[in-house]
Amino acid sequence: MIAIDPARLRSRVETLARFGGLPGGGVTRPCWSPPYEEARAWLLGEIRAAGLEAWVDPAGNVFGATGMGGFGAERPAVLTGSHIDTVPEGGILDGALGVLAGLEVLQTIREAKTAHRLPLAVAAWSDEEGRYGSLFGSRAFCGTLDLLRVEEMAAVDGERLVDAMARAGFDARRSGEAKAPAGAVAAYVELHIEQGPRLEEAGIPIGVVDSIVGVRRSRVVFTGQADHAGTTPMERRRDGFLAAADYALKARDLVVKHGGGRSVTNFGVVHVHPGVSNIVPARGELVHEMRGPDAKTLEALARRCASLASRVARRRGVGVELRPMSATAPALCAERVQAAIEGACATLGLGSTRLYSAAGHDAQNLAAITDAGMIFIPSKGGRSHRVDEMSDWDAIARGANVLLHALLALAA
């Protein structure tokens, strides 16, 4: 039975981890950064060394393929992939596994001369982690990128997307040219670590994803009054940070109460201005993220949180402004792709279970233009977005082999 080369896949995973690698383990490799551009150049070299065609589109997405010179509706491709950018102090598998396993699968199929009717391709989508714009590359490819907002897209530290892309040799204003022709993708399958504990705790080797959560991010800015921290009486203070803190705690309780048991929320970025110990903060700024698998629930939570922000601001005598940053809709995975994954598991004698993805992925954008799905493998301890993120190497090989047979079934 055709199978991937586990040693070759492991070698590529470990080599990619060196780009932006940290002394104590883990990786910091944000999209468009120098380590990312070095990794992109390395990946293009690996794609070509594997005997595949290689190209980069105007949104910075990297592709490798068999039997095609680009995307076209006349011969739609079965596509796999993920991303090679990371969060700060992230792990070596989040995203990278799906890209390198996809490359390994395509190389294995080419070397074995295994017949497949449709062409196969692997993608490394740009800025999946959303330093500048969440799922940026796959949104551009799928035609859902808001081109009017490209000029204003920026990282939380203020760096503009147009400047970051220009430094890497790309024109952000041309990102819309990355849109694939209608009908150019026959199916999409993404292999990923689960990033949670469900598979490991259940002792199940493969997760067949049936849906992917939507993610909403907003800046919430409370503006009060700067005052002397020693001489201003407590009852007269209009503290922007305390309003932000009050909102964060109450919003968490609101999501827990009204989120249907599957919605989550986080405040991962906090800015206080002017940010010195002897001045009452004039402004407290949060980046508020909410995730959930149900679109109506997410929309209701957004309305409730907007109302909550107004109430907190009135009670504390400050102003408030909500600035939407990004929003992705929950997506259902295609039954046809789920069946192909389960068929691959049966062929390989592997147990599987259906489950939803609690993290956002490029697959949810692809689901808008084709039949899309995902394969999960267990994460050790459920850990991800941290330097000790890992999966067992045998689990990685199993996931790659499931991807191989699922892609062949979809391309047959």
Image (cartoon, rainbow, N blue to C red):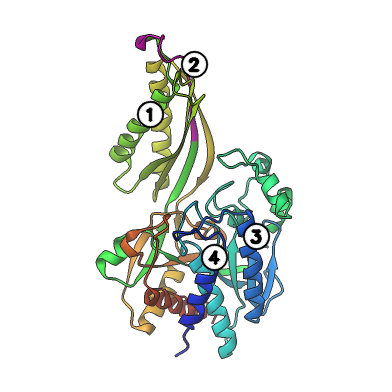
Q: How many neighbours does mark 3 have within 10 angstroms: few (below 14), some (14-19), or many (20 or more)?
A: some
Return the x and y of residue 268 as percentages of the image width and height: 43, 41
Query: Residue farthest to the left?
Result: 202
Which quadrant is home to the C terminus?
bottom right
- The amino acid pointed to by label 2 is Ala
Residue type at numbered disc 1: Ala
Residue neighbourhood size for the residue with mark 1, other residues' Cα within 10 Å, grouped as few (<14), some (14–19), many (≥20): some
Q: Are marks 2 and 1 in contact (CB under 8 Å)?
A: no
Residue of label 4: 18
Disc number lying in front (4 or 3): 4
The residue at the point 46 percent across, 21 percent down is 281
- Quarter of the image containing the N terminus? bottom left
Amino acid carrying label 3: it is Glu
On residue 245, the disc is: 1
Closer to the eye: label 4 or 2: 4
Inter-mark Cα distance, 2 to 1: 17 Å
Q: CA distance from mark 1 to mark 4?
A: 38 Å
Quadrant location of residue 40?
bottom right
Report whether residue 189 is seen.
no
Q: Pointer 4 and pointer 2: residues touching (CB < 8 Å)?
A: no
Q: Foreground mark, 1 or 4? A: 4
Q: Earlier in the sequence, mark 2 or mark 3?
A: 3
Give the Cα distance between marks 4 and 2.
45 Å
The residue range painted magenta reads 219-235
Residue 231 included in the magenta stretch of the image: yes
Quadrant of residue 211 within the rendered picture:
bottom left
Give the structural element (helix, strand or loop) at label 1: helix
The residue to which callout 2 is attached is 226
